[in-house]
Structure formats: C-alpha cells, structure tokens
Amino acid sequence: MVSEYLKSYIENALEQASDKLPKKVIEDLRQSLLNIDIDIDESDVDKIIDLTIREYQHSLIEPGEAVGIVAAQSIGEPGTQMTLRTFHFAGIRELNVTLGLPRLIEIVDARKTPSTPMMTIYLTDEYKYDREKALEIARKIEYTKIENVISSISIDISNMSITLQLDEEMLGDKGIEVSDVKKAISKLKLGKVHIEDIDNYTFTIYFEELDSISALFKMREKILNTKIKGIKGIKRAIVQKKGDEYVIVTDGSNLEGVLSIKGVDFTKVQTNNIHEIAEVFGIEAAREAIAREIKRVLDEQGLDVDIRHILLVADMMTRTGIVRQIGRHGVTGEKSSVLARAAFEVTVKHLLDAAARGEMEEFKGVVENIIIGQPIKLGTGIVELTMKPNMR
C-alpha cells in the first residue's frame, strides 16, 4: 500500500514530468504507481518516471520520417505471406468468415458490404448466464421467413389454392407457433381469401379473386418471402459459450436493428461491417473498427505489424469524415498533387481534368518531386541549406 507521503511525492514528480509526456501517459503512470503491489521509495519513483520519459522520446518519429512509405511497407511485405482462405466458424457449415488477404483487401477497399458480414452480440447480465434466455434473444434476432419453416408447398390450379405443410421441428427450433405463420399471412394484401386447416401443421389458402395461373404463382412467392419475425439481414443467429457467459454470433449484420433488442448489451456489440459502424456510431468508431479489424486479420495469420502503422492507415481512411478506400476513388484520388494522382492510375484522365480546371502543381509531396528529379522533402531533403563560401 502506498503511503500518503509517497502519494504526494508521486503527484509532484508527475507534475514536473507533465511537459515531457502526454496526458494519457501521465494518467496511466499515476494509476500504475498508486496501485503498485510492491514496496517502492522516492528513488524508485524517479527511476520509473525517467525510464518512461526515455522510452517515450525514443518512440517519437524523427522530423522528415517517411511514415507513409514505412507503414505501406510494414503492412504490404507481411501481407504477401497471407493465405487466401475462408474459415468455417465454430464447425457450423452455414457460417463462414473471410480471413487472410481477401479480408484485408475488403477493409482497405472500404467495401460497402463484407463478403461474410457477421456480428458478435453480447448480452446484459439478466440474459448472458442462461442459455435458454440467450436462445430467446437469438430467435428474436434471426430473420425468419415462411419458406424457412415449411417442409412443402403445393399449388392447386383448379381451386386456385396454395397448401402449406409446416415443418414441426423447424417451428420448434425457431420458437414459432402455427398461429404466428397464419398471422403473418393475414397481414399480407392477398385480396379475398379464406384459410382451411387440414391438420395441426397443414392448411390451405383459397384465393377467391385470382383469375390467372401467373397471379397464383406470384402469390406463392409472396407468401414464401413473408417475414414472420427477426431483423432484416440476419440470416442465422447461433448461441455460443464464451468463458462463463453466452454470446450470439450471427451470419449477417444489422447493427441498428440489433441495438433495439431488449437484452443486448449495446456497449459491447461487434460487427465487421465498417460502414454500418460509421452510420450508427460515427467516424471515430469506424476508425477504431478499421484498426481493430486489420490487426485481427494480421494476428490470425501470425504476422507482427506495429499498431502505429495500422493506425496511420485507419487515420488516412477516415480523415475526411467518411470512410474512404485506399485507391483512386478514395485516399489516393484525393491528393492535391496532379502528378501524384496521374502517377497512380488513369494518367491521361487526371492530366486532362487538371488542365481543364487550371490546377497548379506545387511539388510538395514525394511522387511529384521524384518525377521531375528534385530532392524529396523527407529525411535530409526536408532541410534547405544556403551556403556563402566567400564569407570569412
């Protein structure tokens, strides 16, 4: 336990170091020193703070460092070792998740929808320890249509009727009653109809106003695609145990819809759809998600990339307030330099557009200076040195 005297000493020492360290580092140091488990004295405090200052100063980037090129190389080189694979999630055939290079390309290309959208939904204390309660929420979330709970459907052209045979096992699995199916059908605008039960799980719908076979087939499609319950976009919702709590893993993503479900812990919900995160939580959350997703992909492949390179990519993709891809339709296409844009892709188009608008090239970046053979404004080139050899 830290004594009152030592607490006062720590506060004074941190105050003196506040001009050398950022506020976040000072705060982390304060928490660590005040809650330390071993006995320390004033000299130990001084050593810890001095070591922190030294490590922090060594971590800073030198002026003129080519951070963009280093970050690109740092991510691109190990990226060539990545495998092209799709992983079967938790041994379930219907649920896949894209990993490796395809997933990394999806992220940096800022695709509107991932090829395998998925969510991890954490539950509140009331639901997360009880499997049955977790299943109840999973059933509310999973988008269920009539076609998901029937074993067969037949059309009788002579009577202008459609007969549905419901699957008892699927109804139980989805937590749906026969009355729920009938209620969903009754909400449809099918004209004048009446429903006749054949047995507990089979019934026939008679259409009294239909006069053509094509109209009957259209009604069949309309009935099959009718929603019984759930959130649009969530094809599957699977309950899994993580540690001592149950979580729901979904095939499909609908962040806004899931947050409205009672029992879902909105502070922990995760999705791999970056654009959904940006729409619901804002651009800063999207920036965090991009960094987290890239880091996760690299870690899964056993590749070690410094988090600062990944954060630089995330910053560049989100700096305009919307998620932009790394490419000619995004970050690269937004460069102020005409020659830099032209050097990347569609050269003639960029040059013609720039000429039509009367743009001026200021030669501030790397690419444009290399094109004309000037020293780039990085490293030693960042300093302009003037010599007067005749002066004594």
Image (spheres, rainbow, N blue to C red):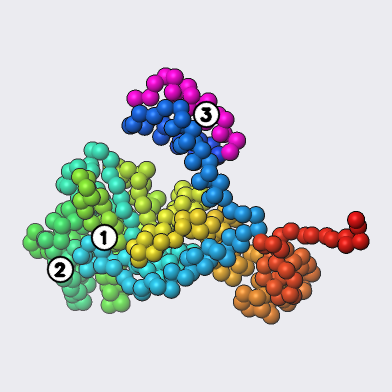
Q: Secondary structure at mark 1?
A: strand
Density class for disc 2 (Cα within 10 Å; few <14, some 14-19, many ≥20) is some
Tell me the number on the disc at residue 52: none
Q: Which residues are magenta?
A: 1-20
Residue 145 at least partly seen: no
Tell me the element at label 3: helix
Q: Residue at x 29, y 47 (%)?
A: 122
Which residue occupies 60% across, 35% down? 19
Queried whether the magenta region covers residue 14, the answer comes back as yes
Pointer 3 with pointer 2, Cβ within 8 A: no
Judged by depth in the image, the label closer to the viewer, 3 or 2, is 3
Considering every residue shown, the one lying at the far top of the view is: 4
Residue nearer the viewer, 104 or 50: 50
Residue furthest out toward the left: 199
Q: Which kind of residue does numbered mark 2 sit on? A: Ser
x, y percentage for residue 209? Answer: 28, 67
Q: Predominant secondary structure in magenta?
A: helix
Marks 3 and 2, the one that precedes in the sequence: 3
Q: In screen coordinates, is 26 left or right of 136?
A: right
Q: Report which residue position mark 1 lands on.
A: 236
Residue 13, which numbered label? 3
The image quarter containing residue 383 is: bottom right
Residue 16 visible in image: yes
3 or 1: tag closer to the N-terminus: 3
How far across and how far down the image is residue 276, in percent?
Answer: 44, 55
Residue 151: image tag = 2
Residue lying farthest bottom? 348
Label 3 neighbourhood size at 10 Å, few (<14), some (14-19), many (20+)? some
Labels 1 & 2 near each other (Cβ < 8 A): no
Position of residue 135 in the picture relative to residue 121 (left or right): left
Identity of the amino acid at label 3? Answer: Ala
Q: Is residue 11 magenta?
A: yes
